[in-house]
Amino acid sequence: MSYNVHRRLIATLVFFVIVLACQTGVSAQLDKAIPGDVKPDVSYTLRTSITADQLVFIGDTGAIKGRINPDLSAPEGAIVQINLINGDGAVHDIVLPEFDAESENVNAKGAATTVIFKAGKNGTFEYYCSLPGHKAAGMVGRFIVGEAREKDRNDAASISQNPAAVGQPVGTRLPRHVTLNLETSEVVGRLADGSSYKYWTFNGKVPGPLLRVRVGDKVTVKLKNADSSDNVHSIDLHAATGPGGGGTVTQVAPGQSKSFTFKALKPGLYVYHCATPMVAQHISNGMYGMILVEPEGGLPSVDKEFYVMQGELYTQHQRDSKGLQAQSVDKLLAENPDYFVFNGSVDALTKIHKMQVNVGDTVRIYFGVGGPNATSSFHVIGEIFDRVYNQASLTSPPLTDVQTTTVAPGGATMVEFKVDYPGRYMLVDHALARVEKGLVGYLTVEGEKDPEIFQALHKRNL
């Protein structure tokens, strides 16, 4: 046998050994995941779409046909196949992280991809597009394994403050003695779908209640710390003139109560928060709210008022982990939050509470930042603020025709605007990467469209 023939034989043998090894490795991976000869037990087809105001998955076949972000379900242990068709021409994919399922990108209209996995555990999970911004823009739905149990999605009570809970205006009344009753408590509350957090709260909500008094009122604050609390708590009201804004005289042990009185000297919208060391820890856990000191004669009337506060959560697990989340003090001190939230939880102002108005309504938003660390650039996408009460001063002339307003931690603002056109308007911090960490809300405007104000000049892609 010649040298060259011998060399070719060796090369051929090596080639087949490599191929066999690769095939064996691939087969081992497939056997570990899904045997190659097993057909899917459950199959769905979804199509991507860009609607007027969001990105979505739309059911393309069977019982889910035409449904936006439909619930998909399968028995535990089932082999599931999800086909994704690109319906809009943008780049998309579909992922289910709990099952290590991730499709290839589809980047041309009509292109398709498939993801196959085993539904190996009961519960309610998410499927979504992992391209940056797409989940926040609407490309997310539920995948339910086993019986649909609502507790899988909402395994803890909502602690998020209703933005419509704005209290009673003071009107034209004279100054009087007002008593404010507050209770601090530590409760496990809903952070997002499938996850919860042990919040520290005023009156069981984040933020605490919007308190309303009048300039000149004598205000008595009665603070009780719940028997079930593990920590000392207190309250510092930025509206109160005196030691610590009340914080030094309201260090309250679990099961105890303390009180103090102050005179509301200056009108304005003020933050209050817990002032027990480590103060940043108490605030980050949810212990903040606002007190409105109305001027003499009250505020001008508007059609709708809303109460919104921005906060930060720092967790030991990475963002979007399931189950009960614990605070990371190291991340807090490094000022590296896992979540930014409006009114306590990730979807407080998108799924839990509705902010709804009609075309022609005048809207006032009381906006504050609990923080404790990040400054907000508050903005409503698609609207212009007619009036901004800069730094929540009610005695200075308001700024007019403002796009975005800056609010520091422990600060506030009051914005007013008239809504002129129907649609869904997004509340954001214009540090827009924070949308990916949960910071978004919806203001829904209903009514007749006016083409003189806004008109799409192309056919919508549905």
Image: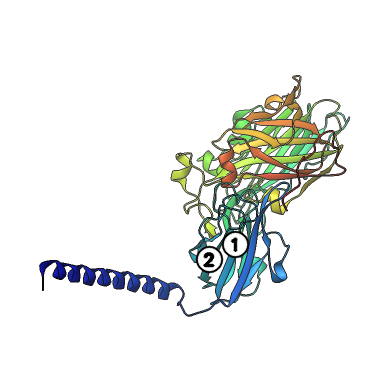
The residue at 33%/74% (across/down) is 24
* Along the viewing direction, whichever of 340 and 249 lies nearer the viewer: 340
Going from the N terminus, do you reach mark 1 or mark 2 first?
A: 1
* Along the viewing direction, whichever of 18 and 367 lies nearer the viewer: 18
**Residue 367 in sight here:** yes
Figure check: 34 above or below 424: below
What is the crowding at mark 1: few (fewer than 14 residues within 10 Å), some, or many (at least 20)?
A: many
**Residue at mark 2:** 115
**357 relative to 432 in the view: left or right:** right
* Along the viewing direction, whichever of 402 and 162 lies nearer the viewer: 402
User: What residue type is disc 1 on?
Assistant: Leu
**Residue at mark 1:** 84
* Along the viewing direction, whichever of 26 and 233 lies nearer the viewer: 26
User: Where, quadrant-wise, is the N terminus in this rendering?
Assistant: bottom left
Q: Residue furthest top?
A: 397
The residue at 62%/35% (across/down) is 430
**74 relative to 10 in the view: left or right:** right
